Image (cartoon, rainbow, N blue to C red):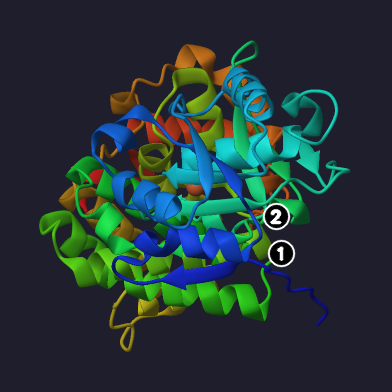
Amino acid sequence: MSFNYYMPTRVKCGNGISKETGELIKELGISKVLIVTDRGVRSANLLDGIENSLLTSHVDYEIFDEVERNPSADTIRKGTKYFKQYNCHAVMAVGGGSAIDTAKAIAVMAVNPGDIIDYEGVEKIEVHPLPIVAIPTTAGTGSETTNSTVITNKETSFKFGVLSSYLFSDLAILDPALTLQLPQEITAATGMDALTHAIESYTSKAANPVSQGYAIQAIKLIVEHLPKAYFRGTDLVSREKMLVAAMLAGVAFSQSRLGNVHAISHTLGGVFNIPHGIANAALLPFVMNFNLPACAEQYKDIAIALGVDVSNLTKMEAAQKAIEVVINMNKSMNIPLNIKDLGVSLQALPKLVEDSMRSGNVLINPRLTKAADIGSIIENAFYGNLEINGIRREVSVY
Ligand SMILES: [Fe+2]
């Protein structure tokens, strides 16, 4: 077995730790930082403690708060202009995956020529980006410990990935106090994004023993703590465990990449602007069902991590239980059981298939996938049909 493991991000975790941001940034030798965030984070006063800490530590800062859902290449251009105009030395994301991905792309474009759309693909970045600090305010993206950023080209409605070992953040600050106010639907969507990362990473053709260790631990934490964080948002312990789980899943997929769920969900995000986590959650059972013949053993491992008693089950029965648990988690958190309810239209099917096939994630999906397979998965997810052993069943019967 040969593999490479590389994850250079320093992770600091603890309740209230974001109030130490100024000191931590100073240790990196940064004297002026661009805070990359969105207006929701700002109006929820999540920046207050961080700004105070920067002021106390005499670290200068500017704020770019124009991050939107499924961040566009235009926003990267705007943010990069802002970064240069104010002579910043580093970026600091405060927000969900969109803020972190925007900050990473700005850090790249501050020192590299051309446009962010030129960097689609793997290891295209030539000059090392400026320092990146990530302070997640959701527990899902894992972008704080990954080597990628995902940006949308609005002209083509295409969501593309930039992968590079330069895209790991220098510092990730995990403070559960920043996630206590998250609304239920965002807790659910981001938590299921993290679960999708862990499951796709564990079963990826590019998984290795290190990434699988991180992924399985993330799954155990999510199944226990996502319901608690969802139903009792102020549960600080569960909020912290979810931040840790999302980070672990991020480390896992930074090594293994993902699979068909992300290939398709990025496409749905680009074409229909559907929230990433919700798209993943709704697609996950259908992709798992498609993958079942290729990775029943791994799905059995996942079922065990999800808390299923598999002692009297065959390998295939245990693997199917993993899918049932995912469906029941979606149901319990009011996540749609099909993608029709997310506003997807099958008129766009040819483009959805073509764009999904362009994703590198299809190549490392555990089951060999052709364009027609992606089409079938999207159609099944649209109608809410799971075909098991040749019998079609409505997802809602689980
Ligand atoms: Fe994701």
Compared with residue 307, is residue 56 higher up or lower down, i.e. above or below? above
Image check: 225 left or right of 29?
A: left
Residue at the disc numbered 2 = 364
User: Residue, x 66% and y 56% (percent of image)?
Assistant: 168
Query: Is 4 situated above or below 271?
Result: below
In the image, the residue with mark 2 has its CB under 8 Å from the nearest atom of ligand 1? no
At mark 1, the secondary structure is loop
Are discs 2 and 1 less than 8 Å apart at CB?
yes
Count of marks placed on residues:
2
Query: Is 241 on the left or on the right of 2, as rendered?
Result: left
User: Which amino acid type is shown beneath numbered disc 2?
Assistant: Ile
Q: Position of residue 268 (x, y in %)?
A: 49, 27
- Density class for disc 2 (Cα within 10 Å; few <14, some 14-19, many ≥20) is many
Residue lying at 11% horizontally and 56% vertically, measured from the top left: 231
The quadrant holding residue 307 is bottom left
Considering depth in this image, is 158 or 66 the residue closer to the camera? 66
In the image, taking residue 142 as reference, residue 18 lies left or right, namely left
Vertical comparison of 69 with 142: above or below: above
Q: Secondary structure at mark 2?
A: loop
Looking at the rendered structure, the kind of residue marked 1 is Ala
Would residue 197 appear left or right of 32 to someone viewing this image? left
Q: Nearer the viewer, residue 93 or 5?
A: 93
Q: CA distance from mark 2 to mark 1?
A: 6 Å
Disc 1 marks which residue? 206
| Residue found farthest to the bottom | 311
The circle drawn on residue 384 is: none
The reply to whether residue 294 is visible in this rendering is no
Q: Which residue is drawn at the image coordinates 44% and 28% (left, top)?
A: 65
Q: Position of residue 364 (x, y in %)?
A: 70, 55
